[in-house]
Every structure is written in structure tokens, then in C-alpha cells.
Image (spheres, rainbow, N blue to C red):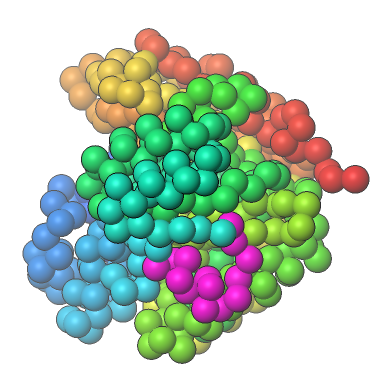
Amino acid sequence: MNVLLIGSGGREHALAWKIAQSPRLRRLLCVPGNTGTGSYGQNVPFPLNDSDALVDLAQRENVDLLVVGPDNPLADGIVDHFLAAGIPAFGPTAAAARIESSKAFAKEVMAAAGVPTAQTHVFERAEDALAFARASGQAWVVKADGLALGKGVVVADDLPATLAAIERLAATPAGSRLLLEERLHGREVSIMALCDGQRLLVLPPARDHKRLGEGDTGPNTGGMGVFAPVDDVSPALLDQIVATCMQPVVDELAQRKVPFRGVLYGGFILTEKGPSVLEFNARFGDPEAQAVLPLLEGDLLEVLYECAIGGLHPEKLRRRRGYAVCVVLCAEGYPGKPRKGDPIQGVEALDEEELLVFHAGTQISARGLCTNGGRVLGVTGLGNTLARARANAYAAAERITFEGKHYREDIGQGKDTETRK
Ligand code: AMP
Ligand code: GLY
């Protein structure tokens, strides 16, 4: 099979690594790819926003399957273009990807499907949101409706912070519509499932760490690290979340004739009253994919293809025993404006059984391997215990060096990892 993989982050390196294990793979093309994906296939520098040109490329190269990593091309309808040209695609159409690209749409689908989620008020005009918040006299979680690179949510602590967040988000492209949401409390968990429009293949639950600083402090980022599986999500709780929050959304979309094919990724909060949906994404999480894909045994490519054409066999991917901890090594300045071009040492020497190093923001220049983005590398440690996986990841995180390197030291450690009594 010839595969075209879209994206250039650590997630896409992890996907390329796993897809390349399939005996069914003939050729892998990555657009645009990165230093890591280049080891498994051919990187093709091509603009992601020109779907027609991408379809032409796919036809010229006899591509059998499109696999889409990031959210923006999905929202822009890349899958619709490929399907119109008769090329199978792993990823939702633009209409189904609205579960991520419009939070108001997601809320409406959840309400119709009876899925537990925070109470929300949707506003078309910032003035109305301001007036509503003032009249309520309380703090709200303020969300921009559209895609905002993980920067579209403010969990405000009081009314003045709520009002400031409304004004700030209303001025962004994603904030032409705003949501004010009731604040919920509890631990969070990310659950991704591969979907063929009807059935789900549920992947091991993961816990992301979005804040920059240890103990979940500081500004939000794209994700500083993740561990999986999450032991406070028991098999029974996982089944409950899938049955009450994920399958009903898949069924609702199918009933609306916008079947969801691709990765349905739910962000959940485990409240005292039970699990509740914070958001849905329509793609693999990053760095979640870098911890979860290494925990799978089986032919991922075959399963992605089944999702694309319908007829998923969920038993084809099995969960391997043990844990994965992915620590993201970031460049100076991240999550603001990251510095690029710092030489990286110590990656080549790392080739160990319980360690994977995924490239995200790197490039090969005249000075060798250099930083080229905010999230530079994801180091994934594996092990029979969470402690072992963590030790493996952190040993590598220390050995790899570049000027300005920083990372969180508490991924897979502390109260986040304790099993609930
Ligand atoms: P989202 O992109 O909607 O998942 O929001 C990003 C982060 O904001 C989540 O991971 C939560 O930490 C926080 N958040 C979002 N909605 C709520 C809510 N209703 N209550 C508490 N925290 C929330
Ligand atoms: N790590 C969060 C995300 O991929 O949305």
C-alpha cells in the first residue's frame, strides 16, 4: 500500500514509525514530514492548504490511503477532496471534523445524544456574553468556538478575569462565537478511539500535561508530556466513558449522515458526579500519540485502512503490557516565540529497547541536527511499570542537549498518577 501522511510534528513521526512496521506498506510519502518521518519514507515539501494539488500528487504517486495528522487540514476539507477523487482517507470529512472545529456544534451534538458535559451558553456577539457574565456575577470558563492552536480556552477565576477573557478571545479569528461554560473539577483524561463511522477501537487512556510548569502551573502549551495508560481509569470506567460519551456521539453523527471516520479523541474530566466531556478532537493528540502508539501491538496501517473504507475489526490492535511516558523537550522561548537553530547533541546515540525519540521541531542544517520549533523532541520511555517508563524517558531527556532546552520534570509522577481510592 502507498500511504500519504499529512503533518510535521512528533505525532506524525510516531505515526510514520508505527505505519512503517506494517508488512502491507510499500511506500510512505510525508507532506511535509520532518527529520523523523524522513527515516521511514519520503518527505515532500508541499503546501497543506492546496488540497487539489495534494490530490494530484496522490494520483501521480498511486496513493492508496491518506492519513491526516493535524486539525486544520481536516477542518478545511482535505478528506472531502480525496474522497471525491476516489482515494480512501483516514480522517473525518470537514462536516464530521466540526466536532472539533466548532465547540458550539460539539455541544449541540452532545445535547442531542444525551452526553454528559458542562452546561454551556453560546453567544454570537461579545456584548451579549459580557452582559450575561456581568448579570451572573460569577466566573466562567470562556471558550472561542473555532480552532485556536490550544489557546482558545480561559478558565477564569473571577468575574473580572472572565470579562477580560471574553474581550481577548472575541478579538481572535476563532472567537467570532463564544461559549461560557460552567467550571467542573476533577482529574482529566484523554481517550482516543479509532472509528470507521460506526464502531470504535479504544486506545489506552492517556494523561496530558498542558501547562508549562511543574504541578500544572504557568501558561497553556500544546502539551508538555503524557503518560499512558492511566490507572485511575479502570476498565469498567473506560467502558462507561465509551458507552455514555463516545459511542452516542458516533451514533448521532451517523444518524445525521455525517459518519465519523478517523480518531475521535475525547478530553474528559472525572467529576464527583461522573465523567464529563470537556471537548472532542477529530485527530490523534500530540504528544498523546507518542505515548499511546508504542503501547499497541498489531498492524496499525491495516486498521487505519479499515476505518477509511468501513469494516473496522477492533480486535486487530491489542494493548501491550506496560506503560509509556513521553516527555517533550522544548526550545528556549516556548510557548511564546521559540528560538530556532540551536544544535542538538545526543540523539544519535540513543537506540535502546525501552526508548523512542520522536522528532517534532528539528531540522538538519549545515551544523547538523538543530532546533526548528517550540516542541523540539518527544522522548518516550517504555517499561513494565510507570516508574520504569518514567526513568527511561528522563534518562534520555537529560542526555539529549541543546541550548535553551527545557521540559517538565513531573510527567508520570505525583498525585496525577495515584490510583483513586
Ligand atoms: P479544552 O480545549 O476545551 O479541552 O480546554 C482546555 C483545558 O481547559 C482543559 O484541558 C481543562 O483543563 C480546561 N477546561 C475546559 N473546560 C473546562 C470546564 N468546563 N471546567 C474546568 N476546566 C475546563
Ligand atoms: N495534546 C493536546 C492535543 O493534541 O490537543
Judge whether residue 82 can be spotted in this image.
yes
Q: Which residue does the image show at 73% across and 69% down from the upper left?
A: 239
Question: Which of the two residues, 173 or 415, is positioned nearer the viewer here?
Answer: 173
Judge whether residue 37 can be spotted in this image.
no
Question: Which of the two residues, 212 or 272, is positioned nearer the viewer here?
Answer: 272
Side of 13 where 279 appears, left or right: right
Side of 279 where 231 appears, left or right: right
Residue 27 in which image quadrant: bottom left
Q: How many marks?
A: 0
Q: Position of residue 347 (x, y in %)?
A: 44, 25
Side of 418 where 146 appears, left or right: left
Q: Quadrant of the C terminus?
A: top right
Q: Position of residue 7 (x, y in %)?
A: 30, 51
Q: Position of residue 14 (x, y in %)?
A: 45, 48
Side of 412 where 40 appears, left or right: left
In this picture, which residue range is highlighted in magenta?
A: 105-118
Q: Position of residue 307 (x, y in %)?
A: 45, 77
Q: Quadrant of the N terminus?
A: bottom left
Q: Eyeballing the image, is 260 above or below 121?
A: below
Residue 122 is inside the magenta segment? no
Q: Eyeballing the image, is 194 above or below 414?
A: below
Residue 199 in which image quadrant: bottom right
Q: Eyeballing the image, is 393 above or below 184?
A: above
Q: Which residue does the image show at 68% across and 66% down from the upper left?
A: 241
Q: Which residue does the image show at 21% across and 24% down from the upper left?
A: 365
Q: Which residue does the image show at 64% across and 25% down from the upper left?
A: 215
Residue 276 in which image quadrant: bottom right
In the rendered image, the residue lying farthest to the right is: 421
Residue 113 is inside the magenta segment? yes
Q: Main secondary structure of the magenta part?
A: helix
In the rendered image, the residue lying farthest to the front is: 135
